[in-house]
Amino acid sequence: MDIHDHGVWVNENERRVRCKHCGKEMTGLNRLKRHLSGTSSRMTPCTQVTLTIREAFRDEVTKEESDLTAAKSKRVGEVQMGNDHKRGREEEEEEEDSSRKNESAENEFLLSNKAQKCIGRFFYEHCFDFSSVDSLSFREMIAATSLVGEMKLKIPDSEELNGCMLQEAVEEVQDHVNKIKDSWAITGCSILLDAWVDQKGHDLVTFVADSPAGPVYLNSFYVSDIKKDVAALTSLVYGVVEDVGVHNVVQIIACSTSGWVGELGQSFKSNNLNVFWSVSVSHCFELMLVEIVKMESFKYILEKVSNITEFINNNREDSQGMTVSSSEFEFVKPYLAAGTILKAKNNLEAMVASPDWNKEEGTTVSTLNDTEVTTDFISALGYLVQECQVIAKIGRQLKMYRLGKGCFNEASQADKITGVIPGEWWAQKASEHPELQSFAVKVLSQTCEGASRYKLKRNVAEKLLLSKGVSPCEKQHLEELAFVHYNLHLQSSKLQSQTK
C-alpha cells in the first residue's frame, strides 16, 4: 500500500504532511505511516482510518522493524568477530542510505502532489466530466508524459477530483477571490450582467464583478418566473450589489438594452439608486453597426464583401496569401473584412481634414463634449459621494486640478505622461488631495466592456440552475464546482489579456 495516497503535503519547507483520514499534521512520511498503523507509543494513532488500511501499514511497519532487527543482529555477529570498526562504518552508511531513501520518497510525494493539483485545476477550469480521468486514453496520455522523467506519476481518480481535491481548489480559489475583494475599497468595481435564454427557453443570468485586480464570479440565477416583474428583478440585482458592498460598486454593465434587461435598466435609472447603469460598449457598437447595415448602399457593399471573403476562405491557393481580419465579436467580422479588402481610408481622412468639416462639426463636438463631461462628473459625484463635506472638499480640490497647481502641475500636461494609466497616476501622485484622489481612482478604474469579453461557458450555470431533484449536498457540490470553474476561467482570461 502506497503511503502517498493517505497524506497531503501542507508545508514544503518543514516537510509537514496531513493525514487524509483525520487531518492530523506531522513531520515526514515515516511518522504518517506509524500514525496510520498505530504501532508507535510516541504517535497518536489515527481514529478515522479503516481497519484494512491500519492492518496493511501495521504489517509494513512490522516488516521494516523486523528487517532492521535482522540487520542489527548481523552487526552484533560482526562485533563478536572483532569487526568493530567495520560495524560502525556500515551503521553510518545504512543510516545515510535510509535518510536518502526517505528524502527521495518525500520529494516524490511533493512532486506527485503538485502534479495532481495541476490536473485538478485543468478539469475545474475547463469543466470536463470527471469520469474522463478514468478513460484509457487519458491515462495513456499521462503515462506518455511521465516517461520523460524518472518519477512515477500518481493520477487522481474521479472520486478524488469530486472530493478532497475539489475542496482544496475551493480554498485556493477563495483565497484568490478574497485578495481581489480587498482591492475594491480603493478601486471600486463594476458588476457585469450576462443574460441569456437557453435552448429550452429558460431565462438565466450570471453576475461578474470586474476591477483592475481581476474579475470575480459572483452568482447565477434563474429568472424566467420573475422576468416580467421589474420590482423583483430590481430587488435581485440590488441584492447582488449589497453582497458586494454598495460602497464598492460604481456601475452595473448590462449586456443588452432590450427585453427584461432593458426594462431593468430603465427602473434603475428612474429610481436613482446609488449605482450607475450602463451598457456594454460592444453591444453599443453592435447596435450602431446593425443600423449601418440597414443603409442600402452599405448593405450592397457587405454582400460583395461576403462573396469575396467566402472565395478567399475556400480558395487559399488562389488568394495569393491574402487573409481576412477576424474578431471575437461575430457582428464585427463583416466590417473588419470590409476594412481589409477595401482599405477605404483616404476618403475618410480627406473628409475629416477638410475646412468645412472642422467648421461645421468641430465647435459643436467640442461644446457637446465639455457639456457632457461636466454633467457626467456632477452625476457621478452625486452617486459615489454622499457626504456634503466631502463633496465640498472635492469641489475645492478640483479647482486646484483645473489650475494645475501643486501635484496637479504634471496632470495639466497629460500629453507628456506615458507608461501609466490614469487610475494609477491618481493613486500615485494625488495623495495631497485624498478626497478627489479616491473619487478619481474609483471612476477611472472601471471598465466599459461587459461579460462577453470573458466568454463564460453558460452550460455550467445551466447545470447548476436547471438540475431537478438534486439533494442539498449535490446542490452545494454544483455551486462549488461553478465557483471554482468560473473563477479559474476568469483568472486565466485576465492573464491571457495581460500577455497580449
Image (cartoon, helix red, strand yellow):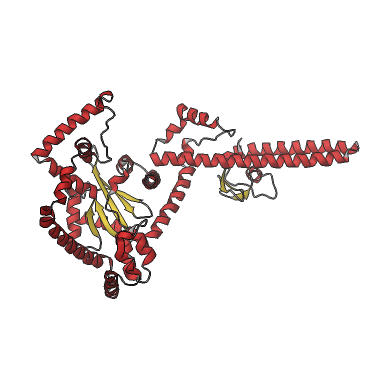
Of 352 and 132, which appears nearest the observer?
352
Of 75 and 83, which appears nearest the observer?
83
Rendered residue at 45%/53% (across/down) = 175
Q: Quadrant of the C terminus?
A: top left
Of 486 and 406, which appears nearest the observer?
406
Is residue 298 visible to us here?
Answer: yes
Q: Quadrant of the N terminus?
A: top right
The answer to which quarter of the image holds residue 322 is top left
Viewed as shown, does residue 440 lie left or right of 110?
left
Is residue 467 visible to us here?
Answer: no
Rendered residue at 78%/42% (across/down) = 92
Rendered residue at 21%/31% (across/down) = 309
Question: Against 414, is 468 above or below?
Answer: above
Which residue is farthest left?
Answer: 296
Of 58 and 6, which appears nearest the observer?
6
The answer to which quarter of the image holds residue 396 is bottom left
Rendered residue at 21%/35% (across/down) = 341
